[in-house]
Image (spheres, rainbow, N blue to C red):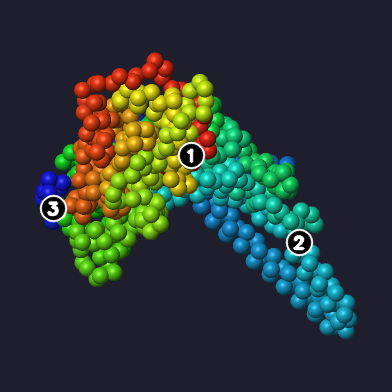
Amino acid sequence: MIEEIDPNDYVNTENIKIPPMLIDQIIGQEEAVEKIKKAAKQRRNVLLIGEPGIGKSMIAKAMAELLPPEELQDILIYPNLEDSNNPLVGVMPAGQGAKIIETTKKNVKGQEERKNILMIAIIGLIMAIGFLTSQFLEAIIAVGIVFFALYQIKPKNNQSAPKLLVNSDGKKVAPFIDATGAHAGALLGDVRHDPYQSGGLGTPAHERVESGMIHKANKGVLYIDEIGTMNMKTQQQLLTALQEHKFQITGQSDNSSGAMVRTEAVPCDFVLVAAGNLEVLKDMHIALRSRIRGYGYEVFMKDTMKDTPENRKKLGQFVAQEVENDGRIPHFSKEAVAEVIKEAQRRAGKKDSLTLKLRDLGGLVRAAGDVAVEEGANEVSLEHVYEAKKQSRTLEQQIADRYIVQRKEYSVFNNEGSAIGCINGLAVIGNSSGIVLPIAAEAAPSQSKEEGKIIAAGKLGDIAKEAVQNVGAIIKKSIGKDISNYDIHIQFVQSYDGVEGDSASVSMATAIISAIEDIPIDQTLALTGSLSVRGNVLPVGGVTYKIEAAAESGMKRVLIPASNKDDVLIEKRYKDQIEIIPVNTLIEVLEYALVGPKKDEFIKELKQNKIDKIKDIIPNPSTIINQNPSSSEN
């Protein structure tokens, strides 16, 4: 199995060569890499959209490496002798700004030394005259006056000494500035408040000017993740800077003395790499997005890649990169890398795929390395990865484990015997944790003269509501039973966090049929799947984690959509604990789920299509109570 997953000939990750350029270290995002190369060459802006942890910030850093560093500039702020509140801006090649500041400091130091010598000479002369004339008190007063007067006199060159706002001296690559979450002052520049604004004690206006991230990113890359969280005014100002390639610095607080100061336009010729998920687009300034789209590229990044030998090799390179970047963990053996790749298969959630949520996968690599360090091992082994998977469980996994223990202890669900109208559905918390979702149904005679109702208890999301509404049509189509004469009550037992998605459809339909027909359901069985209105079982997400949750809960069998059978990559320890049964239709589900003396006749009738109680009216489930969506059925 190891050879199947990892066909490379290396012994451990120390033998894997890591590319020197960051752009060549990016895994699985070939389309994004090609567009970034074009964008860097032509200085285009980029919008990266995708899930967290798939490499958006790494791509932005790689773009900074591709930009030419010889264009970098130093930016200085000079005092304006005509209008002190409007400091002047000077721009020069990288390294020149520091030389000007150094020359100015030497001149100022020489002037200070000459002033001090003059002060000492005058004070000495006054004290000598006082000693000769015996007027010591008058001499001391005169010395004080002279000292204060000379202290207040500042050299002309000191008054005009510039401030180095952006220093690019010695930089080998273009700057990369991560402005994610930055407030307006940090992003756009600011002017410090001056508590001493009079009496000659105040700090000159140009000395109080502070550069913003847009200015520090001049000739480089400005990266902003979750850009939709930035307020509209700041996005508008960012757009101005993006269009003009320069932006004035002023005080961002209206109550600050810095609000009086406004510099000349300061260069900020940066390339913007904005990022986020699909949700941020609705909060993104429409003109800012238009600017990026019109003068750059929009990239929708992948969260999985094909499971091929070449891509497995890339994941081996990823493990080697993580080891080198961390610097505190040993290299991985070939077997350990194979297990990391296998975990990438599991986390992809679908067949023939590897996950590209590499930040999370990197957490497993570091956890395994920590286990090896704790044991004093020189190499991370397969056993270390196994232990790391136990120790580095996500919060959702820990919550799911606690749910299972508590629900077992308090008999929220049964894993033995049979019961009418009760079924063990399966759900997912987050993206990588399964739980058992008990569902109970009861059929009572309709209290309405027109039609029955389906009443669902539990916090349901929009998709879950629609799934409930479709149940009536599904049941009529599959078994010929019109439920308009019944009030159907469905309870998602203790689903305090809410239910979302439609993968409880097959569970709901089975529970309702059991309640109507008075046929028990096998409680050693759990199931998941979405249902079409024609009674076909459709694929769902998270099937691997749902199966593992069923096994942890003591179930003996689990029904899954036949379309998901190749997506199953459960841990070895679960394989002997639970039987996995793929199903295609609701009738197949009923054949496996129902038990008791009435079952055989009922199934036989369905298969022979001897249905003589089909009514003309398809029920219209209308009233659904207690529906306040929150989270987690997938």
Q: CA distance from mark 3 to mark 1?
A: 56 Å
What residue appears at the point 42 percent right and 37 percent down from the top-left corner? 442
Q: Quadrant of residue 410?
A: bottom left
Which of labels 2 and 3 is toward the front?
3
Name the residue carrying label 1: 457
Name the residue carrying label 3: 10
Of the residues shown, which amino acid type is indicated by label 1? Ala
Q: CA distance from mark 2 to mark 3?
A: 73 Å
User: Relative to residue 94, is residue 54 drawn left or right?
Assistant: left
Name the residue carrying label 2: 152
Q: Quadrant of residue 475?
A: top left
Q: CA distance from mark 1 to mark 2?
A: 80 Å
What residue appears at the point 25 percent right and 40 percent down from the top-left corner? 596
Of the residues shown, which amino acid type is indicated by label 3? Tyr
Q: Quadrant of the C terminus?
A: top left
User: Relative to residue 130, is residue 494 drawn left or right?
Assistant: left
Which of labels 3 and 1 is toward the front?
1
User: Relative to residue 22, is residue 78 drawn left or right?
Assistant: right
- Element class at badge 2: helix
Of the residues shown, which amino acid type is indicated by label 2? Gln
Q: Label 3 crowding class (10 Å Cα cut-off): few <14, some 14-19, many 20+?
A: few
- Residue 461 seen in the figure: no
User: Relative to residue 150, is residue 544 drawn left or right?
Assistant: left
- x and y percentages locating residue 441 in the rendered image: 41, 38
Circle nearer the N terminus (1, 2)? 2
